[in-house]
Image: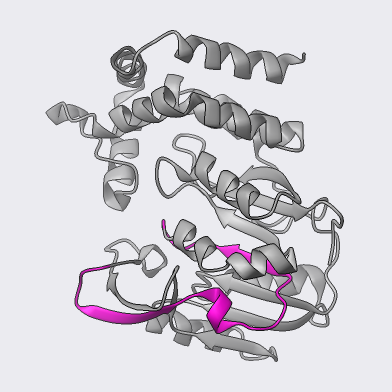
Amino acid sequence: MNIIDKNFYELINLLNQMDVNEIFENIKSNYMKVHPDTRASIEKFVNDFKYWGILDSSNNDFNLIYEKSLSFYEHLEDYIWLYKNLKDYRSKKLLYGILNNWYRYDFTTVKECYDNTFKHYFDLNLIPSCNNTTLVDLGAYTGDTIEDFINIYGENSYNKIYAYDITKNSIAKMKNNLAKYNNIIYRNIAISDKEETLYINESVIDASANIVNNEGNIEIKATTLDNDVKEKIDIIKMDIEGYEQKAINGSINHIKNDNPILLISVYHNNEDLWKIPQIIYKLNNNYDFYLNCHGGNIFPTEIVLVCIPKKSNSN
């Protein structure tokens, strides 16, 4: 055993000795020791985005902390499963850092895991090259991830890129930003687990945080990736504000048959971090799992599950 294993299992064993209310009271106590200015910043952030629950210490509303406590209480075995299935110790340390942040409001360990050597999704240790690649970008926004891909691997690295976004203005900006590149297909539709009509819930923060649900004023067509793209896919990136599980369930045939590299955001709610890896594993157990994080260490976000086919570390 090493220090990362030791720290992780000590935290798990500590949590395993408590009921949900004890966990809640301890997290709440740890949170209230955080500097008031930092607490105010955390609360503004989480309440603006509303992914994880409400946190308003001035009104004694600690719903977010209770939800994290419940996740610990009900899913310790799932976090252990994930830890055991992560391929490298950077990923394992990051998982420990995230859980330690949730429990102790420790801001150090996640920060130690940051590596700015590579761009958000494209770690060259995991994806060293791409050739004749078909890339699907779900949540393409204004094309930033696609530009990263082309800048890293070259204009001749891809066969075709499918760029999906639910927001028409983002599609327009993306077309302008990527105008000099060929073979990019722009799709102003949502990817879900079935054919349906959904509605856009516009974020007051930024269009990148727009979400889809079953109610609203702006209609958007939804389909499955399996129905919308019939050719073989080599890489699928998903950052779709909590709709990742449904998109995965609409991509079952591609995941089972194509063995694409998967780059999936797992931070938009309180269950994706452990649940999405298990969904992928049940669909196709031929993946090695990694985690990386490019969000803040005060409240970790931009957490990405990287799934690399075991038989090949490149396209």
Residue 305 in the image, given as x and y percentages of width and height: 62, 49
Q: Nearer the viewer, residue 185 or 193?
A: 193
Which region of the structure is painted magenta? 214-242
Quarter of the figure with residue 251: bottom right
Quarter of the image with the N terminus is: top right
Residue drawn at x 69%, y 90% as measured from the top left: 183
Task: Specify the color scheme.
Answer: one colour
For residue 157, say whether it is visible. yes
Quarter of the image with the C terminus is: bottom right
Task: Please say if 43 is above or below 188.
Answer: above
Residue 158 in the image, given as x and y percentages of width and height: 77, 80
Residue drawn at x 34%, y 37% as measured from the top left: 42
Residue drawn at x 46%, y 87% as measured from the top left: 172
Residue drawn at x 25%, y 68% as measured from the top left: 214
Residue 174 in the image, given as x and y percentages of width and height: 52, 82
Task: Please say if 239 is above or below 168.
Answer: above
Of all residues, the one furthest to the left in this rendering is 59
For residue 107, say whether it is visible. no
Specify whether residue 229 is painted magenta. yes
Specify whether residue 6 is painted magenta. no
Task: Please say if 98 is above or below 164.
Answer: above
Drawn side of residue 177 relative to residue 33, left or right = right
Task: Please say if 298 is above or below 284.
Answer: above
Q: Nearer the viewer, residue 215 or 51?
A: 215
Circle count: 0
Residue 103 in the image, given as x and y percentages of width and height: 43, 22
Drawn side of residue 210 relative to residue 263, left or right = left
Quarter of the figure with residue 228: bottom right
